[in-house]
Amino acid sequence: MSATIQYREPYRFSAGILAMAVHVAFVGMLVLGVRWQSQQPDSFSVELWDSLPVQEPVTEQVAEAEKPKPPVENKSASASAPQKADIELRDKKIRKETKPQPSAKELRQKKLLEERRLMEAYAEKQRQAVRESVRAEVLAATSAEMGRYQDMIRSKIRHNIVMPPDVLPSAAAEFKVTLLPDGSVLDAVLLRSSGNAAYDEATERAIYKAQPLPIPTDPMLKKQFRELRLTIRPEDK
């Protein structure tokens, strides 16, 4: 009896350890089963489509992506621009109001220039007055010389008139006489009759008879005698 007990005792300890391991494994399986059941299942959502969505062309998406983005306005720079313009305008106004005063030398030079300008203007005015005076004298002398030669021409024509009878002293015949440079008569045209046809014809004959008519030798005056308007009366008045 004692021999049998002694033979079985070495296996009693191993059996106890094995039983404990089985219980521990069983407890672990229970714990894992409880945790797996406590987790919420994953949820899923399903959408129903009547038709497949139309995909945009890849080119439009690329073009949309390549569009240049509008430049970001620099608000600080745009806000500072009016302030800068105001500052520049104020500086210009200040510089304009604070012009440097001319020195004494500059004032003297300005005064001398003004006096010189006045003197030159006065001298020019005097020269102009002299020129006008000379011109007037020349015109007066020319007019007097032309009048003198016209009187000589009328006198010579009158001396060559064969006076018809019954001519009134107030008779006056006006002719346009065209002369050559040597005083020869090129043409004589009656412009206004004296009222006496005999006197008009006698005067026309006297004009041609009196040639060459006296004309000035001065070239400038001679040009004035190319064409004359002469009024011939029986007597000088």
Image (spheres, grey):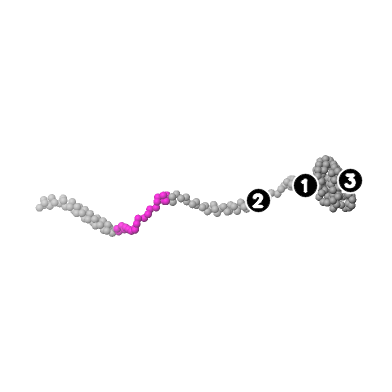
Q: Which residue is mark 3?
A: 159
Closer to the eye: label 1 or 2: 1
Give the residue displayed 88% in from the left and 45% down from the top: 160
Q: Amino acid at mark 1?
A: Ala
Q: Is residue 133 something that shows in the picture?
A: no
Residue nearest the observer in this picture, 163 or 186? 163
**Image x and y of residue 115, in percent:** 77, 47
Q: Is residue 48 something that shows in the picture?
A: yes
Q: Which residue is mark 2?
A: 95
Crowd class of label 1 (few under 14; some 14 to 19; many from 20; radius 10 Å): few
Q: Is residue 51 above or below residue 129?
A: below
Q: Start and end of the magenta stretch?
A: 40-62
Q: Secondary structure at mark 1?
A: helix
Closer to the eye: label 3 or 1: 3
Give the residue displayed 25% in from the left and 57% down from the top: 33
Image position of 88 (left or right of 12)? right
What's the mark number on residue 121?
1
Q: CA distance from mark 3 to mark 1?
A: 57 Å
Q: Amino acid at mark 2?
A: Arg
Q: CA distance from mark 1 to mark 2?
A: 36 Å
Q: How many marks?
A: 3
Marks 3 and 2, the one that precedes in the sequence? 2
Crowd class of label 3 (few under 14; some 14 to 19; many from 20; radius 10 Å): few
Q: Are marks 1 and 2 in contact (CB under 8 Å)?
A: no
Q: Is residue 128 magenta?
A: no
Image position of 75 (left or right of 95)? left
Residue nearest the observer in this picture, 97 or 129? 129
Residue nearest the observer in this picture, 193 or 94? 193
Marks 1 and 2, the one that precedes in the sequence? 2
Q: CA distance from mark 3 to mark 2?
A: 90 Å
Q: Amino acid at mark 3?
A: His
Q: Are marks 3 and 1 in contact (CB under 8 Å)?
A: no
